[in-house]
Image (tube, grey):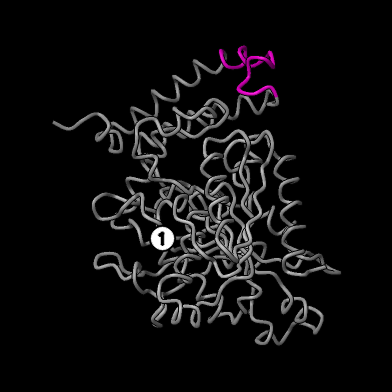
């Protein structure tokens, strides 16, 4: 007989659960409003009334989503992003080697969204004036990998517009006309879709990186790798891949990026295979992450025995490696459940000779305010964090 949990992702049980969960949340909302009026009763004394309410609602929402396994429908149609969305085909070059050469999971056609506008090769733009061409040649291109526990998100406007704004506003050097930064958010195959376990998402990151290098003729020295939460995990996996998996071949075809920005990277998904991965954490009360969400993500992305959830490509926390001098900016929130894992990862990476890792703690922040800062009411904190990132990146890239 099927369990209740296995029935919830399917209609009509899904619709019934959503209705019941919505009603239950509405009934509890007045209680939360009263409970969080005194600052002393909020999840943390630093939280404003709005932050206390939104973090609690986000935790409820994340839990309900994980119960019904709700996820966006995979599509490569342009949608509202229109000309800013670009479909990409897998490369014919030998760039899917070793761990990416899976007998079941093969590279596939994907897409990505440009912010604020599509980047085009300046050499091919006849209508642009010389000043605009020069600006594009000096542009910073950020390849961003979205979060969502490997099961949610797509990098499009409804998903990433807030984070993309932080990057385009603060990451690059300001020019006379505008901030000269372009973000390409890859829409990788999420594991909530059929036959999209590891290494599908990492294959897609490689495809997107190759697209920037070859199709758009962008030098690797102008590309910054970025990822939030599970996307940060994938950014780390990409750096490991090009430096450890036949580097003599891959570093010629996939030269290393200029820098890496890791926003609250999920560096130990394997922990979610154990009981109470989030609720057993001392920061559980101040964050919106839940056990059910973490478990859904890792079981979908790294199902045993096909994939080892504790291996270096899934849980890099305990597997430091030499990243060939790519400077890393590793950020975490002081009030998030992943804080301890992120610190341990950064410290391990720092001990490897040649690595350059800057660990940045964002005080009073839950998980991934890069993505959720606006909706959760942490906008000021997120802006300050992004300004710090921008100063760090300009110094590393020698931009003024």
Residue under the point 36% across and 70% down: 107
Q: In this view, does 116 lie to the left or right of 205?
A: right
Residue 395 on the magenta span = no
Residue most extreme to the right: 176
Closest to the observer: 38 or 271?
A: 271
Q: How many marks?
A: 1
Is residue 58 positioned above or below 322 on the image? Answer: above
Quadrant the C terminus occupies = bottom right
Q: Quadrant of residue 190?
A: bottom left
The range drawn in magenta is: 31-45
From this view, report whether residue 71 is shown above or below residue 243: above
Name the residue beneath numbered marker 1.
Answer: 201
Image quadrant occupied by the N terminus: top left
- Graded by Cα atoms within 10 Å as few (under 14), some (14 to 19) or many (20 or more), the crowding at tag 1 reads many
Callout 1: SS? helix
Task: Looking at the picture, tell me which residue is in the foreground, 348 or 234.
Answer: 348
Q: Position of residue 16 (x, y in %)?
A: 33, 27
Q: Work out whether residue 184 can be spotted.
A: no
Q: Answer above or below: position of 39 versus 271.
A: above
Instruction: Tell me: residue 61, above or below residue 202.
Output: above
Residue 158 position within the rendered picture, expressed as x and y whole percent measured from the top left = 56, 49
């Amino acid at each position: 007989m099927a369990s209740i949990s296995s029935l919830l992702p399917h209609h009509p049980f899904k619709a019934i659960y959503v209705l019941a969960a919505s009603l239950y949340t509405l009934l509890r909302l007045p209680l939360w409003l009263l409970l969080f009026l005194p600052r002393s009763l909020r999840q943390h004394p630093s939280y404003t009334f709005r932050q206390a309410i939104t973090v609690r609602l986000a935790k409820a929402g994340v839990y309900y989503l994980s119960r019904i396994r709700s996820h966006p429908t995979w599509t490569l149609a342009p949608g509202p992003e229109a000309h800013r969305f670009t479909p990409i085909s897998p490369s014919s070059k030998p760039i899917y080697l070793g761990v990416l050469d899976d007998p079941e999971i093969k590279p596939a056609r994907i897409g990505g969204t440009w912010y604020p506008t599509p980047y085009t090769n300046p050499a091919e733009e006849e209508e642009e004036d010389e000043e605009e061409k020069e600006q594009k040649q000096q542009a910073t291109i950020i390849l961003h990998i979205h979060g969502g526990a490997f099961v949610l998100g797509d990098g499009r406007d409804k998903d990433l517009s807030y984070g993309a704004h932080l990057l385009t506003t603060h990451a690059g050097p300001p020019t006379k006309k505008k901030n000269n930064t372009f973000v390409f958010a890859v829409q990788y195959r999420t594991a909530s879709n059929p036959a999209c376990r590891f290494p599908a998402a990492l294959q897609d990151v490689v495809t997107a990186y190759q697209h920037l290098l070859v199709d758009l003729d962008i030098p690797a020295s102008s590309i910054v790798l970025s990822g939030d939460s599970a996307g940060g995990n994938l950014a780390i996996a990409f750096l490991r891949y090009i430096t450890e998996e036949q580097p003599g071949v891959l570093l010629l075809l996939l030269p290393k990026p200029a820098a890496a920005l890791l926003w609250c990277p999920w560096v130990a998904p394997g922990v979610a295979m154990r009981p109470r991965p989030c609720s057993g954490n001392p920061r559980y009360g101040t964050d919106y992450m839940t056990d059910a969400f973490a478990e859904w993500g890792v079981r979908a992305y790294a199902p045993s025995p096909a994939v080892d959830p504790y291996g270096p490509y899934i849980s890099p926390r305990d597997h430091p490696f030499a990243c060939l001098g790519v400077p890393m900016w590793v950020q975490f929130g002081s009030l998030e459940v992943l804080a301890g894992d992120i610190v341990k990862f950064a410290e391990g990476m720092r001990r490897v000779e040649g690595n350059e890792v800057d660990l940045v703690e964002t005080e009073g922040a839950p998980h991934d305010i890069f993505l959720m800062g606006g909706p959760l009411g942490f906008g000021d904190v997120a802006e300050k964090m992004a300004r710090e990132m921008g100063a760090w990146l300009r110094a590393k890239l020698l931009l003024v």
